[in-house]
Amino acid sequence: MLRNLIKKLENFQPCTSEEVKALESYITPVRILKKSEDLIQESDKPYEVNILLEGWATRYKITDAGKYQALSFLIPGDACDVHITLIDRMDHSICAVIPSKFTSIPQHKIEEMYVSHPRLARAFFWSMLVDESTLREWIVNIASRQAHQRMGHLFCELLVRSRAAGLTADHGFIMPLTQQQVGEAMGITPVHTSRVISKLRQEGLITWENKFLKIHDWNRMKEFSDFDANYLHLEKADPNLTQDI
Amino acid sequence: MLRNLIKKLENFQPCTSEEVKALESYITPVRILKKSEDLIQESDKPYEVNILLEGWATRYKITDAGKYQALSFLIPGDACDVHITLIDRMDHSICAVIPSKFTSIPQHKIEEMYVSHPRLARAFFWSMLVDESTLREWIVNIASRQAHQRMGHLFCELLVRSRAAGLTADHGFIMPLTQQQVGEAMGITPVHTSRVISKLRQEGLITWENKFLKIHDWNRMKEFSDFDANYLHLEKADPNLTQDI
DNA sequence: CGATCTGTTGATGCTCATCAAATCCAGTGG
DNA sequence: CCACTGGATTTGATGAGCATCAACAGATCG
């Protein structure tokens, strides 16, 4: 059940079977969310560290002007910040983009983990650093690249992360987002998103059908999108994750 | 010497004199950086948690296309991620924008802190969550607000953070950045930055002279900029920090 | 006190938003 | 099984926001 999470953490360091067991003992019963249902909302008090088991989710905020802004996408194995319970109110919401299954680790189990399994705790800290690094790269992406590159960059990221979570091994992966949703992440309108994607298709860089996205020429796509996976901190992971295999 | 850092951490929870002493015992000798000198560069291995004592700094990245993108500004009292030493290579650089003084806490002292002063460690974790939240708000700011609001929002943030670090108490604060530098953060050119700022001045929202920025009408500025300080997580701090005092 | 950095202003063009309408598709109910 | 419905995507036309190029004024500094 925690397959993808463990696969992901093992990109930082191997997990012993004992650690896996400990992790399994921490988690709460599965919570199932329908499409478009919020897991937690801005201004809610967080009591546990959520983990996505199946499905896809998005972190988002809505501005006063009513604009919806996606902040990151969660894929199976992604966990929220281990220290999140320190804050009183969420500063953003998390929503299931398709029917999804979540579990969580309650606050007191986290503290138990610090003490009894510091190695495991470190793996979660690493994961948190990667999340933070990813936010920085999104700022770079949105602030300083044009829409075409920006979109390509997002697709590269999602491919590498899907590989790192053991969801795919080649250049295609399941991406159950609508064009509008990827546009909301990159700060462009659905209309422009459509134009950008049709351009990527014309260039022969991707195909995207039936929720399945395939990157045709990884090296050309990386160059086109100015993508460098350094920010995902997979230094200790299988180099194939970020290469043209 | 750690005055601003302690002031900042106390917005989360009070520090005992014993904790202050412990913190002081952890830190390394002061390192002085000249203007435009890098504290650490992308791809360097981090060995310690840096803390800015005096001056200003910026986190930044440079894209393949040669575009410089600022990712956040550091003011006195700001610390880098407590877990940063877990990663092998920095994903961004940090540069002094004016002559600045830094100190740091070495990796092994951090681990010592986890054990001997968990309360202190928690305050650092909180600070890290705020940094992450701030990155998310920057994404919202850059992706979904226009340049005028974006700039106003940045100024609001810097004022509240300056107050939270005990650097100012009213509506003015020292901001030693050039227009180009704030533009680099907001993803706009120096030319457009100049136009945006002259508009903010015309509207009577700010004055900015001799590195001193003053916000005239806090409530009007907040509304203009769609600024809501929730993301800085000052829930337990003095409410005046975010109000029109 | 020249040289360089910083800020200002004007003119022009590109990127992307907005408005509008048509097509395609999945899901629903009869 | 088919007609209906609402969402998702596509395409076209127009305009706003910001980039870019250029020139100049003011500030800063060795």
Image (cartoon, coloured by chain):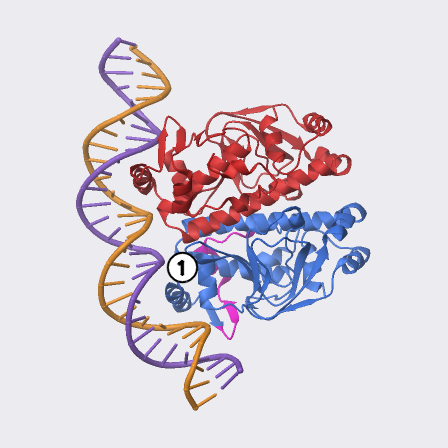
Chain colours: A red, B blue, C orange, D purple
Residue B217 painted magenta? yes
Position of residue B98 measured from the top left corner of the image (x, y, whole percent): 57, 70
Decide which of A38, A111 is in the foreground and name it. Answer: A111
In the picture, measured across the screen, residue B116 lies left or right of residue B169, that is right
Disc 1, SS: loop
Kind of residue at disc 1: Ile
Count of all numbered marks drawn on residues in the image: 1
Farthest front residue?
A: A245
Q: Can residue B54 be seen in this view?
A: yes
Position of residue D25 measured from the top left corner of the image (x, y, whole percent): 36, 81
Query: Which residues lie in the magenta part?
Result: B209-229
Residue position for label 1: B188
In the picture, measured across the screen, residue C29 lies left or right of residue A26, that is left
In the picture, measured across the screen, residue A142 lies left or right of residue B37, that is left
Vertical comparison of A97 with B93: above or below:
above
Vertical comparison of B21 with C30: above or below:
below
Which residue: 40% across, 28% down?
A212
Vertical comparison of D15 with A180: above or below:
below
Vertical comparison of B236 with A115: above or below:
below
* Image quadrant in which you'd find residue B101: bottom right
In the picture, measured across the screen, residue A132 lies left or right of residue B226, that is right
Position of residue A33 measured from the top left corner of the image (x, y, whole percent): 52, 26
* Image quadrant in which you'd find residue A214: top left
Position of residue A225 measured from the top left corner of the image (x, y, whole percent): 40, 45
Decide which of A122, D6 is in the foreground and name it. Answer: A122
Pointer 1 indicates a residue of which chain? B
